[in-house]
Amino acid sequence: MPVQLGLVGKPNTGKSTFFSAATLTDVKRAPYPFTTIDPNVGVGYVKIRCVCRELGVKDDPRNSICIDGWRFIPIELIDVAGLVPDAWKGRGLGNRFLDHLRRAAVLIHVIDASGGTDAEGRPVKPGSYDPLNDVAFLEREIDMWMYQLIKKDWGKISKVMDLKKDYEELFSRFSGLEVKREKVLEAIEELGLHLKRVTEWSDEDLLTLVKRVRAAAKPIVIAANKADVDPAEENIKRLKKELGSRYIIVPTSAEAELALRKAAHAGLIRYIPGEGDFEVVGNLTRKQREALEYIRERVLQRYGSTGVQEVLNRAVFDALGMIAVYPVENEAKYTDHEGRVLPDVYLLPKGSTARDLAYMIHTELGEKFAFAIDAVTKRRLGADEALKHRMVVKIVLAR
Ligand SMILES: Nc1nc2c(ncn2[C@@H]2O[C@H](COP(=O)(O)OP(=O)(O)OP(=O)(O)O)[C@@H](O)[C@H]2O)c(=O)[nH]1
Ligand SMILES: [Mg+2]
């Protein structure tokens, strides 16, 4: 299953616009709250420098896309309804929508950095609301939602755990949120909760535990959106100064990215997602030219890019610490058994071994795994050796 990133935030901040831009699918977007009700799920991409250029080969991608030496690797995005304060208690569209985020590995918090949306998602004059308020609010909503899920029938399950002297019930609750047991155990020990019986944990102990686990298992990346609208630039400076040590913060203009991708799709411009400029190649109307010029000045020249690609990349490579690896069957030609050059790229957690890669491709491949070779240096990899980002790996099977 591909890694999933969840787009969250109060209503009207641009989540669906971000989703549309990143997946190039049309979904409902409008300048009022609760435009999105049912979640949208789609495919977006992270972008890496492809190894094809340095290896001097023309690649033939299958599970990913190569454009001008940039490899785009698919990930899944989910765009949910806007959250209002106390959504976890069922306010607004409530916690039903939070439940769609169970599988998300990173939460991308889309905020309206221009301060043009109030706490409930209603449009207000830009600059009249402080977007810094939204950061703590969102984190609390997510934490309380998790806490509530974990705490259900606590009296009963805490007794069971004390009786069995284990944490199985708790692990299984968290595993429904795609949280691994090691992360839960780590947090229990860090907080010293293993020194007490589970039935003696206070509500506060449990909430602290949930917060700790949430931060480790579902990190939040901030997309400071509507960066094209004044006074977003000043707000983003403040945001970075006050919260930059706790969060990855990326200025974005989802609207600009959407316009650029649509123009590129229509053959009007050449634009590679994430780049700092575009080239006009088609016939533009005056209105189109003005709109693109606006994007160049207000977004690309100011921030270096629209930020949408950077958010996805930072979520996967920095917040999750994943690496991208190319498996091949022929280490001389870098091909699969059909002769396709560098067909696939897989995203794996840092620290993964070649055997982990084999299991990820196919269980059978994992079971028959004998050893692996770095296809570029032809060096045999150690059984416990961690793979490196952008490695090309040949898996050798036992007979
Ligand atoms: N200027 C500007 N406007 C944007 C940007 N991104 C989104 N918008 C506008 O903000 C409004 C809300 O966008 P949506 O994408 O529908 O917002 P949402 O967060 O999905 O809203 P809900 O589904 O109601 O929670 C629309 O009018 C968008 O055109 C941006 O980067 N810049
Ligand atoms: Mg929406």
Image (tube, helix red, strand yellow):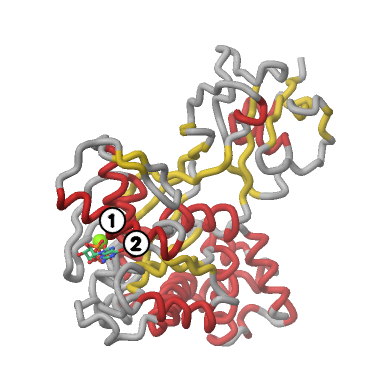
Specify whether residue 64 is in view. Answer: no
How many circles with numbers are drawn on the protein? 2
| Number of residues whose C-alpha sits closer than 10 Å to that of mark 1, classed few (under 14), some (14–19) or many (20 or more) | few
For the residue pair 156 and 337, the one nearer the viewer reads as 337
For the residue pair 214 and 44, the one nearer the viewer reads as 44
**Snapshot quadrant of residue 180:** bottom right
- Where in the figure is residue 42, as x and y percent of width and height? 34, 45
Residue at the image position 30 percent from the left and 65 percent from the top: 96
Give the residue pinned by disc 2.
297
For the residue pair 156 and 123, the one nearer the viewer reads as 123
Kindly tell me whether mark 1's CB lies below 8 Å from ligand 1. no
- Where in the figure is residue 12, as x and y percent of width and height? 25, 69
Residue at the image position 33 percent from the left and 48 percent from the top: 41
- Where in the figure is residue 326, as x and y percent of width and height? 62, 32
Q: Secondary structure at mark 1?
A: helix
Q: Amino acid at mark 1?
A: Glu
- State which image quarter holds ligand 1: bottom left
Give the residue pinned by disc 1.
293
- Where in the figure is residue 24, as x and y percent of width and height? 30, 44
Q: Secondary structure at mark 2?
A: helix
| Number of residues whose C-alpha sits closer than 10 Å to that of mark 2, classed few (under 14), some (14–19) or many (20 or more) | few
Query: How far, Cα to Cα, is label 2 from label 1?
Result: 6 Å
Rendered position, 130 above or below 216: below
Residue at the image position 57 percent from the left and 34 percent from the top: 345
Specify whether residue 320 is in view. Answer: yes
Dots 2 and 1: beta carbons under 8 Å?
Answer: yes
Residue at the image position 72 percent from the left and 42 percent from the top: 388
Residue 39 appears left or right of 389? left
Residue 189 appears left or right of 167? right
Q: Amino acid at mark 2?
A: Glu
Q: Quadrant where the C terminus lies? A: top right
**Snapshot quadrant of residue 361:** top right
